[in-house]
Image (cartoon, rainbow, N blue to C red):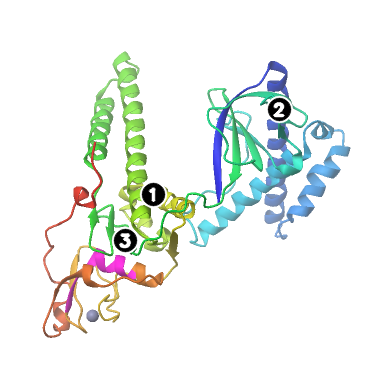
Amino acid sequence: MQLRYGFRLYPSAGQRTALAQAFGCARVVYNDALRARETARAAGLPFPTAGELSKRLITKAKRTPERAWLSEVSVVVLQQSLRDLEAAYRNFFDGLAGRRPRMGAPRYKSKRDTRQAVRFTANARWSITPGGRLRLPKIGDLKVKWSRSLPSAPSTVTVVQDSAGRYFASFTVETGPEEVLPETSPEVGIDLGLGHFAVLSDGTKIDSPRFLRRAEKRLRKAQRDLSRKERGSRNRDKARIRVARAHAKVADARREFHHQLSTKLIRENQAVAVEDLCVKGLARTRLARSVHDAGWSAFVAMLEYKAARYGRTFVRIGRFEPTSQVCSACGVKDGPKPLHVRVWTCPACGAVLDRDINAAVNVARAAGLAVSARGALVRRAPVPAPRGEAGTHPKQPTQPVWEQAGIPGP
Ligand SMILES: [Zn+2]
């Protein structure tokens, strides 16, 4: 798996000039390629291939007086810039096709963008000198603040300048599963819902911890205070700073919660299954805000990399698995149910099922995990209930909460 390690860089004045030139050249090639593709599209022609763009916008362009200065930077930086554009288009089209969250079309880069970056792959022959400096082609040996050690030799380095003018090196390191945990037997499916942050196939329901809810409450209050302050006043400035701090606190608390929960799930289970988030289709509804606030994708990404790191199985089940429509006790499909239906009765076998836990069991099953439907059963009816009764049960009191997941609050 790939891990990233970031370190602060302290380039000299000359190196800063060389980096600015590299950022500029990478940006120009990116924008040229974007223009070439958009021109082709407007003319109804097929997109030029990556190979064509590389030949036209790098190799040939260098021989023209307008773009001769491109040869002053490493060609790898320019090729990587073309790859970035490819990736931006791929993500855009995947978003349109529903394979990932929707995002905007690639846009032209500007000198005034808050983040400038160039990437050097192994082909660029960059290196770390015996004296611990980062040697970059056509830029020089840069001073690095090594705040921790790298687990193995990195393959790629990205040099970034942020909006505050600071420089960072981000190294990509390939690591094996060296931290594999001893094998365990439980396997679990997770339903990421709206009522609870997560519901597990064993029946556990997990809500956001108190420390996160408190931080969110403080943020809402700070935002209300800000909206009441007069424009241009000093008090408004102060309120704005308070909002910014509260925002950062919420983000930190949420990340902490995701880390604790994902570590616990990966430690305690040999296999973990989740539903692909774009399948849920919730992000397109008016519930979008709470979905994004719940930060599921960040959480799922943590589950995925921790599973790889600790030798566990992570499965993301694909589209069109009707997890909330199938009875996990007998497997009969019962059709869609409105969101307010939290408990329903299977018309075929009469089992009374908790909607979320039933979905979590189905997620685990669709991923091929061995889980029982026991957790999803609210009660088992002796005779099949008539069809009209399905979905008419009142909302059950919510039982296991955050504390029952066994994760200590602050
Ligand atoms: Zn059933």
User: Residue at label 3?
Assistant: 191
- Mark 3 and ligand 1: say if the CB distance to the nearest ligand atom is below 8 Å: no
Q: CA distance from mark 3 to mark 2?
A: 50 Å
Q: Residue furthest top?
A: 234
Judged left or right of residue 237, residue 34 is right
Q: Secondary structure at mark 2?
A: loop
Front position in the image: 173 or 160: 173
Which label sits in the foreground, 1 or 2? 2
Residue holding disc 1: 299
The span picked out in magenta is 351-362
Give the residue type that dot 2 points to: Pro
Instruction: Determine the image quadrant of residue 140.
Output: top right
User: Taken as a whole, is the magenta stretch helix, strand or loop?
Assistant: helix
Q: Quick one: label 3 or label 2, which is nearer the N terminus?
A: 2
The part of the image, by quadrant, that contains residue 192 is bottom left
- Tell whether circle 2 marks a residue whose Cβ is less than 8 angstroms from ligand 1: no
What amino acid is labelled 1 in the image? Phe
Residue type beneath disc 3: Asp
Measured as percent of width and height from the top left, residue 291 is found at: 33, 51
Residue 298 is situated, as x and y percent measured from the top left of the image, at: 41, 47
- In depth, the one of 142 and 359 nearer the eye is 142
Q: Which is closer to the viewer, label 3 or label 2?
A: 2
**Magenta-drawn stretch contains 353:** yes
Q: Position of residue 113 (x, y in %)?
A: 58, 31
* Image x and y of residue 324, in percent: 29, 69
Instruction: Identify the residue under disc 2.
Output: 130
- Classify 60 as above or below 241: below
At horizontal 34% and vertical 22% (from top left) the residue drawn is: 241
Q: CA distance from mark 3 to mark 1?
A: 12 Å
Residue 354 visible = no
Quadrant hosting ligand 1: bottom left
